[in-house]
Image (spheres, grey):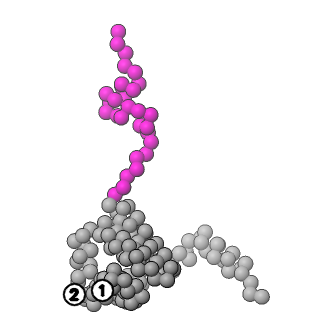
Amino acid sequence: MVTLSDFQRKRAAGGRGDARQGSPRLSLSSTGIGLGLVGFGVFFILFGMLLYFDSVLLAFGNILFLAGLIFIIGFRRTFTFFFQRQKLKGTSFFLGGVLIVLMRWPLLGMLLEAYGFVSLFRSFFPVAFGFLGSLGNIPVLTKLLQKLGESSSMV
């Protein structure tokens, strides 16, 4: 008489049949990878600025930021975003700044990038500031901000 063990029953039912059956799997989507790349890109850009405009860190941060943007919204949508007729000026300043940083002129490149970034994302700033303003409607944050405001005393 042949009996099936629990392992064999799970395997026959289509499961993996091991102890990790119920454990969650690590799932990396392209959006998650893109957010990681953008996060590391911003980190390297800020760290490069902190270290007196280190051109290697700034260039690496720029490449990671652009790669992450492509992973998040896709190549075609990134291309159409950057090359819209009304955004060509901002795109040229931003990508020109990236090229200037890659050519090891970090201060000038970051100034051009900053102007291009503001020009490109000008329509997004009111949405972002509106979101930041709505954080005051969250009860926990409101109490925290009130406590922080009361505790700081100017002597």
Q: Where residue 85 is drawn, which disc sits there?
A: 2
Look at the magenta stretch and give its main secondary structure. loop
For the question of whether residue 110 can be seen, the reply is: no
Callout 2–callout 1 Cβ contact below 8 Å: no
Instruction: Decide if residue 12 is on the left or right side of residue 76.
Output: right
Q: Which residue is rendered at x = 61% and y = 74% of the image?
A: 142
Residue at 34%, 73% (x, y): give it: 63
Q: Is residue 16 above or below residue 90?
A: above
Q: What stretch is highlighted in magenta?
A: 1-29
Q: Does the magenta stretch include residue 122?
A: no
Q: Which one is in front, 120 or 107?
A: 107
Q: Residue furthest right?
A: 155
Q: How many labels does the image show?
A: 2
Q: How crowded is mark 1: few (under 14 residues within 10 Å), some or many (20 or more)?
A: some
Q: Say which amino acid is labelled 2.
A: Arg
At 41% from the left edge and 33% from the top edge, which residue is drawn?
Answer: 18
Between 46 and 18, the one nearer to me in the picture: 46
Determine the secondary structure under disc 2: helix
Q: Which residue is depicted at the point 26% across and 68% down?
A: 74
Q: Mark 1 points at which residue?
A: 96
How far apart are the two marked residues, 2 and 1, measured between alpha carbons? Answer: 17 Å
Q: Is mark 1 on a helix, strand or loop?
A: helix
Report crowding for label 2: few under 14, some 14 to 19, many 20 or more residues within 10 A (C-alpha): few
